[in-house]
Structures are given as structure tokens and as C-alpha cells.
């Protein structure tokens, strides 16, 4: 793919974010008071549940609400449950004003739960940990949501094996996505852009997968790992971030970074953890595309000493104490926009309608 064409595609995609990213709440939501569910027995009509029976085939349904969390510390809190449930098509906003044990001033809180699906929701303008917060919660799905104007769009703490896919985490003040002490999660096919500090931030979190995302125009770091090992970062477009596109910092070891496109970041990458991270996927798979790589492609083979080009640079891309042994000559064939045949792959841009 021609580099200029690729950058133009990214610009078009991001213009969609800017044009469509305004929250539109005129969508027939039903106003509702904050909802607190603290056990399986609380899944009932009195707690905002409109259907289901809690099985995998027929989960509890919470749907279609406009909830202002001012003074409550949450819009929807679900804790200590094992039943299957879905929260969908809700506008959750302005959680603030309560610092109780279970209320972290977040629009949607999942605490010690499994089997939850949060889909097609808007979470905005909370004052605490995040628009969407998972604590001690495993095996949940966060899909097609739009979290904006929070301290963090998504906050996971001590939460494992969750799937975060097709979301938009943009214009938050600390990070678009934060994982702390959280392992084996997938963050995929999402937009993480225009956050005031970090795009995706992992701290003391291992074995996570970050793939097929656009991570663009965050004030400092695009993807930032701190004391986080054995994570896989691949097929992301990381561009125009204020400091580093990707930063692996303080004992972040055994991470694998490949098939990403690093374009027009102030510094494309930072890694002073020694040679403990891999910045390519070997030959012939290759490494990453670096917009400032100035090498040539006249040779091929694992040692780049055989006649004929192969789309991989003949010399490594070197930075700090690390290097990509097989830098790509053209951007990887991904735009990070989610499924290319899915027009909603950009994450939730406006209202759930």
C-alpha cells in the first residue's frame, strides 16, 4: 500500500471521529435513577431489569436508560454476581459526589462479576476512576461503547480474561484505557485517540493482547507499558502521539511488538529494558513499519543477504537498546478500524440508535 494513500485513509477515518464523535442523547432513552445490583437476587424489575432469566441463552437485560449519576457515584453498579447479564443502549453520565466503598465515581461499575456484556453504551463525564470500571471482574465483554470526557475511558483493576472490542475511548484526561494488575485481556479493533496523557496504559499487567487498534494523537504516549511483561502488541496504527508511539518502561520484559504502523509520533518508540522485548515476528513475517526508517530493500532472506527484495528492510531499525530486525518497507495491511466489512467497527460514535 502506498504510504501517502495509507496516511490519507487514516485521516479520513479520524475525520469520522471528529465529525461523529459528538454525543447525541436525543435517541428515546428512558430517564432512570441510578441502579445498584449487589447479588444475583437483585436482577429484577425493581433494579431496572426488563427481561431475561440469567442464563447464557437468556441473560438479564438492562437497556435503554439515560442515567445521571450526580451525587450517587455511579449510574449502574453491578457487584458480586455470577448470572449472565447484558447492559446495552444506555447513556450513562456525570457520576460524581459519592466516595463510598463501592462507588468510585464511575458511570458503569462491574465489581466481582463474571458473564457480563456491556454493549452500545455511552459513558461520559464521570469524575472518578473511569467511564467504565471493572474491578475484580473476569470473563466479561465490553463491546461497541463510547467512553469520553472521563479521567479514563476504561479502567480495569485486578480483572482478567475480559474482551474489550470495537470501542471508542477518546478525549479522556488521563488515559483512554488503563489496566492495572490485570492479565490475559484483549483490547482490539478500537479507537483510542485524543486523550490528554496516555492512549493505552498497562501497569503490572501481563499476557494481554493489544491488536487492530487506532492509537492516535494522545498528548504523551500512544501505548505505555510499566512493569508489564509478556504482552503482545500487533497490527495497531500508532500515529501522531506527543511523546512516544510505544513506550516500554521499567522492567517491562518479554513483550512482542510486530506488524504495527508507527507514523509521525514525536518519537516512534522507547525501550530501555535491555534486549528482553521482541520488536519483530521473525522472518519472513517481519516487524513493524516505521515512517522514519531510511533503509533500502535490495535483498531478502533471514540474513537479508540473498538476491531480490522482499518488502523487509535490509538493515535493522535501531532505537535505545532495542531494534526491529525486520522492519517493513510499507505499512502493514491494517487500518486498525475493526472488521473492514463492519461499518460500526469504529466504536460507538454517537447515540445507540
Image (cartoon, rainbow, N blue to C red):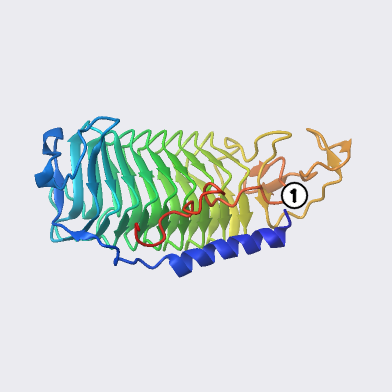
Q: Which residue lies most toward the right here? A: 307
Which residue is drawn at the image coordinates 34% and 67% (left, top)?
24
Q: Secondary structure at mark 1?
A: loop
Residue 348 at x, y percent in the picture: 40, 56
User: Is 44 above or below relative to 107?
Assistant: above
Residue 349 placed where, x, y %?
A: 41, 60
User: How busy is the neighbourhood of tag 1: few (under 14 within 10 Å), some, or many (20 plus)?
Assistant: many
Nearest the viewer among 215 and 5 is 5
* 311 on left or right of 162: right
Residue closer to the observer: 52 or 215: 52
Q: Is residue 35 above or below residue 140?
A: below
Percent of width and height locating residue 200: 45, 50
- Quadrant containing the C terminus is bottom left
Q: Residue at x 72, y 46 (%)?
A: 328
Which picture quadrant has residue 175? bottom left
Q: Quadrant of residue 181?
A: top left
Q: Residue at x 34, y 57 (%)?
A: 352
> In the image, is 107 to the left or to the right of 240?
left
- According to the picture, the residue beneath numbered tag 1 turns out to be 329
Total of numbered circles in the picture? 1
Left or right: 143, with 81 as reference point: right
Can the viewer see residue 88? yes
The answer, for residue 101, to whether it is visible in the render is no
Amino acid at each position: 500500500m502506498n504510504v501517502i494513500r495509507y496516511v490519507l485513509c487514516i485521516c479520513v477515518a479520524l475525520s469520522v471521529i471528529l465529525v461523529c464523535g459528538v454525543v447525541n442523547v436525543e435517541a428515546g432513552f428512558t430517564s432512570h435513577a441510578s441502579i445498584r445490583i449487589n447479588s444475583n437476587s437483585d436482577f429484577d424489575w425493581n433494579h431496572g431489569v426488563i427481561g431475561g432469566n440469567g442464563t447464557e441463552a437468556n441473560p438479564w437485560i438492562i437497556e435503554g436508560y439515560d442515567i445521571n449519576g450526580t451525587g450517587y457515584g455511579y449510574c449502574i453498579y453491578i457487584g458480586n454476581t455470577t448470572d449472565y447479564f447484558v447492559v446495552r443502549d444506555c447513556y450513562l453520565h456525570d457520576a460524581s459526589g459519592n466516595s463510598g466503598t463501592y462507588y468510585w465515581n464511575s458511570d458503569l461499575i462491574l465489581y466481582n462479576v463474571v458473564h457480563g456484556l456491556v454493549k452500545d453504551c455511552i459513558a461520559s463525564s464521570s469524575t472518578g476512576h473511569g467511564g467504565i470500571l471493572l474491578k475484580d471482574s473476569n470473563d466479561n465483554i465490553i463491546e461497541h461503547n463510547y467512553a469520553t470526557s472521563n479521567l479514563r475511558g476504561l479502567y480495569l483493576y485486578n480483572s482478567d480474561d475480559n474482551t474489550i472490542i470495537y470501542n471508542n475511548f477518546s478525549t479522556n484526561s488521563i488515559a483512554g484505557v488503563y489496566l492495572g494488575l490485570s492479565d490475559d485481556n484483549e483490547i482490539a479493533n478500537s479507537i483510542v485517540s485524543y486523550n490528554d496523557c496516555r492512549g493505552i496504559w498497562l501497569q503490572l499487567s501481563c499476557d494481554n493482547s493489544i491488536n487492530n487498534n487506532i492509537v492516535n494523537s494522545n498528548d504523551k504516549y500512544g501505548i505505555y507499558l510499566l512493569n508489564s511483561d509478556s504482552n503482545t502488541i500487533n497490527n495497531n496504527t500508532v500515529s501522531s502521539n506527543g511523546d512516544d508511539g510505544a513506550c516500554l518502561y521499567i522492567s517491562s520484559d518479554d513483550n512482542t511488538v510486530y506488524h504495527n504502523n508507527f507514523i509521525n509520533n514525536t518519537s516512534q518508540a522507547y525501550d530501555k529494558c535491555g534486549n528482553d522485548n521482541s520488536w519483530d515476528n521473525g522472518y519472513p513475517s517481519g516487524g513493524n513499519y516505521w515512517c522514519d526508517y531510511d533503509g533500502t530493500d535490495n535483498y531478502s532472506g533471514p540474513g537479508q543477504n540473498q538476491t531480490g527484495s522482499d518488502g523487509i528492510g535490509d538493515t535493522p531499525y535501531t532505537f535505545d537498546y532495542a531494534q526491529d530486525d525486520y522492519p517493513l518497507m510499507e505499512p502493514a495491511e491494517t487500518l486498525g478500524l475493526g472488521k473492514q466489512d463492519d461499518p460500526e467497527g469504529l466504536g460507538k460514535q454517537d447515540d445507540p440508535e
